[in-house]
Amino acid sequence: MKPNYKPIPSGDSKLFEVMLQNNKKEFDYSWHYHKEYELVFILNGQGHRYVGNNFEIFSSYDLVFLGSNLPHCWINEISAEEQSPNAIVLYLKEAFFEQSWFESSEFDSIRNLLEMSRKGMKFSCDAALRQKEKLVELSKLQSIKKLILLLEILQDLSESSKADYRLLCDHDFSGDLNSVNNERMNVIYKYIAENYNKKISLANVAEEVCMSAGYFSRFFSKTMKKTFFEFLNDYKVSRSCKLMIETDKSISEICYDAGFESIPFFYRQFKKFKGCQPKQYRLNYRKADS
């Protein structure tokens, strides 16, 4: 289950590329990786974000920084009457790090930022909004002004407090060219998305990728650094978060809608992945939103 290598357009600059993505196809790119570092700021839209072995719901003002060769994909959820998603995407190219000035002590904090990005960094909404105006301006500037503003953004992010970001993965990940295994991963993602609210066995999902249950279990754990059922429960918890944010359903209704068969088990898994109980999560979100 390995991702596709995705070549990034070279553009005019040898140092970095800034792109405005504003259609669904640009979001729904299969699980992939590339050598460039990537900073993604969601202007509007919502859906699923996969980074390494992490799965989460994303929405507007989601700001994520990804290290080189870290597998990822964004899958947008959009209905016919909704607006297409929009994002500003920044790619830092290899030449950016080859310049002698980048080894200077002035760049110590930015180099530390890049090191942490190997596990994927998710910034808080407040931290993202502080960069919004600069990122929008960055997509419009030219020449040296663009480079200066880029360095300012990276410096700001590198000075973020620990309360302003969290790491998405427990382990470093790297891509590997293998089209068969890449397709397996995308089949598994699709199967989970379509069946998470049903009872799923190892045999069920292993059959989708033409493996025995035992081989699939070992293969998934080795590749994703977590068991299949840890990944599945993480997915269900994230689905429950989406329901708590977007609906007024009771916690017990959300438990079953998200695919859990037991309320106590749902509470244990929610605390494990989110660090609080479901009711507190909903209250925290509504307080922040207000």
Image (cartoon, rainbow, N blue to C red):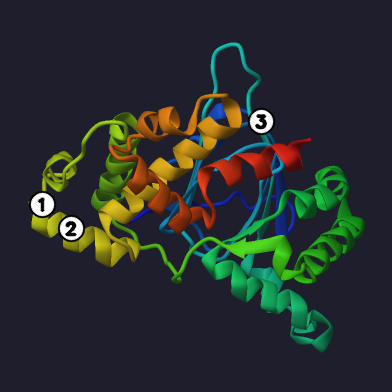
Which residue lies at the image location 30% right of the left edge and 40% below the top edge?
Answer: 262
10 Å neighbourhood of mark 2: few (<14), some, or many (≥20)?
some
Vertical arrangement, residue 225 with respect to residue 202, above or below: below
What is the distance, in whole Å, between disc 2 and disc 3 at their CAs?
38 Å
Q: What residue type is disc 1 on?
A: Ala
Residue with the most extreme bottom position: 105
Label 1, secondary structure: give it. Answer: helix
10 Å neighbourhood of mark 3: few (<14), some, or many (≥20)?
some
Which residue lies at the image location 76% right of the left edge and 51% below the top edge?
Answer: 128
Residue placed under numbered mark 3 in the picture? 22
Locate residue 179, reporting x and y percent: 29, 50
48 on left or right of 110:
left
Q: Are marks 1 and 2 in contact (CB under 8 Å)?
A: yes
Q: What residue type is disc 3 on?
A: Asn
Which mark sits nearer the N-terminus, 2 or 3?
Answer: 3
What is the quadrant of residue 288 in the picture? top right
Residue placed under numbered mark 1 in the picture? 213
Locate residue 258, reporting x and y percent: 39, 34
What is the distance, in whole Å, between disc 3 and disc 1 at their CAs?
40 Å
Residue placed under numbered mark 2 in the picture? 217
Vertical arrangement, residue 184 with respect to residue 239, above or below: below
What is the quadrant of residue 171 in the picture? bottom left
Residue with the most extreme front position: 264
Residue in front for this viewpoint, 270 or 3: 270
Looking at the image, is mark 2 or mark 3 nearer the viewer? 2
Vertical arrangement, residue 154 with respect to residue 268, above or below: below
Residue in front for this viewpoint, 200 or 80: 200
Q: What residue type is disc 2 on?
A: Ser
Vertical arrangement, residue 280 with respect to residue 254, above or below: below
Locate residue 23, reporting x and y percent: 61, 28
Residue in front for this viewpoint, 239 or 261: 261
